């Protein structure tokens, strides 16, 4: 947090990177998806209608009440992707089941599918981003470029920060261990904490 909060990636930095790496942003048609999943696995048949209603209510809260999909997924999704706010990643048409591909590629950015019933539960998919085939415009890839530049700047900034901590501390990195701040090992001299005694004794008056 201390280091990351000081790293600023400007729009000018993004534009420069984009212009120098344009070929990296020529891509096939893709969607970036995240999911909300309500599991029915191992549940009695009598509970299925209640679980369906739960999934419908979650979708309704996002669609009609303005709740954030990612936050809802984090708190209510039964999928392992809940920890990542439901993020599934990016997909081409050929990487998805044809029926799912037909649904999600018909959606715009931010839109959701209807409730999708699977063998193990009820799923809702949201299109986080949509990419048409070909050269991607900078506004579509700016978040991705920002993350790349942030990571690139993070490593040297972290080394500088750790080096500063080493200089201001009394941490000893013993031989055989790697110092992530890349500081040369220097042994620390131990000194007595006891006050120095005077050579001459005070005379009593």
Image (tube, rainbow, N blue to C red):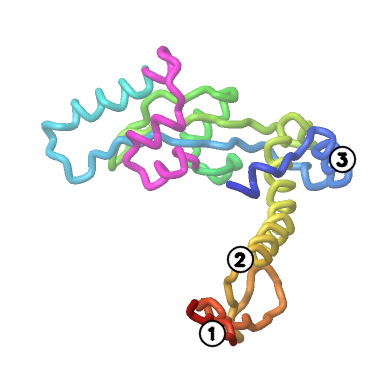
| Label 2 residue SS | loop
Per the image, is 77 magenta? yes
* Picture coordinates of residue 175, whole percent (x, y): 61, 86
Label 1 environment density (alpha carbons within 10 Å; few <14, some 14–19, many ≥20): few
Which mark is in front, 3 or 1? 1
Residue 84, position as x, y percentages in the image: 46, 43
The image quadrant that residue 115 belongs to is top left
Apparent side of residue 204 relative to residue 52 in the rendered image (left or right): right
Question: Measuring 46% from the left and 25% from the top, which residue is drawn there?
Answer: 68
Q: Which residues are magenta?
A: 61-87
Q: Would you name the residue on which mark 1 appears? A: 201
Who's the residue at 70% across and 71% down the image? Answer: 182
Which residue is located at x 47 percent, y 35 percent? 100
Q: Is residue 4 in view from this perspective?
A: yes
| Label whose residue precedes the other's in the sequence (2 or 1) | 2
Residue corresponding to mark 2: 169
Please give the name of the residue rendered at 64% of the width and 69% of the height, measured from the top-left corner: 180
Label 3, on which residue? 16
Q: Residues within 10 Å of mark 2 (few under 14, many from 20)?
A: few
- CB contact under 8 Å: marks 2 and 1: no
How far apart marks 2 and 3 lie (CA) works out to 39 Å
């Amino acid at each position: 947090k201390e280091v990351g909060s000081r790293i600023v990636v400007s729009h000018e930095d993004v534009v420069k990177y984009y212009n120098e790496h344009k070929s990296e942003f020529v891509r096939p048609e893709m969607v970036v998806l995240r999911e909300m999943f309500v599991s029915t696995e191992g549940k009695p048949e009598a509970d299925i209608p209640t679980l369906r209603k739960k999934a419908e209510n979650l979708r309704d809260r996002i669609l009609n009440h303005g709740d954030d999909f990612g936050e809802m997924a984090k708190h209510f999704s039964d999928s392992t992707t809940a920890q990542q706010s439901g993020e599934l990643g990016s997909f081409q048409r050929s990487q998805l089941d044809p029926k799912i591909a037909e649904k999600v590629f018909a959606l715009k950015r931010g839109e959701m599918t209807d409730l999708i019933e699977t063998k193990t539960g009820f799923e809702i998919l949201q299109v986080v981003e949509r990419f048409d085939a070909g050269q991607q415009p900078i506004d579509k890839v700016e978040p991705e470029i920002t993350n790349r530049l942030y990571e690139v700047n993070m490593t040297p900034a972290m080394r500088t920060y750790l080096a500063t901590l080493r200089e201001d501390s009394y941490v000893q990195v013993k031989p055989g261990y790697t110092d992530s701040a890349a500081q040369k090992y220097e042994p620390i001299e131990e000194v007595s904490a006891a006050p120095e005694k005077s050579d001459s004794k005070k005379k009593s008056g």
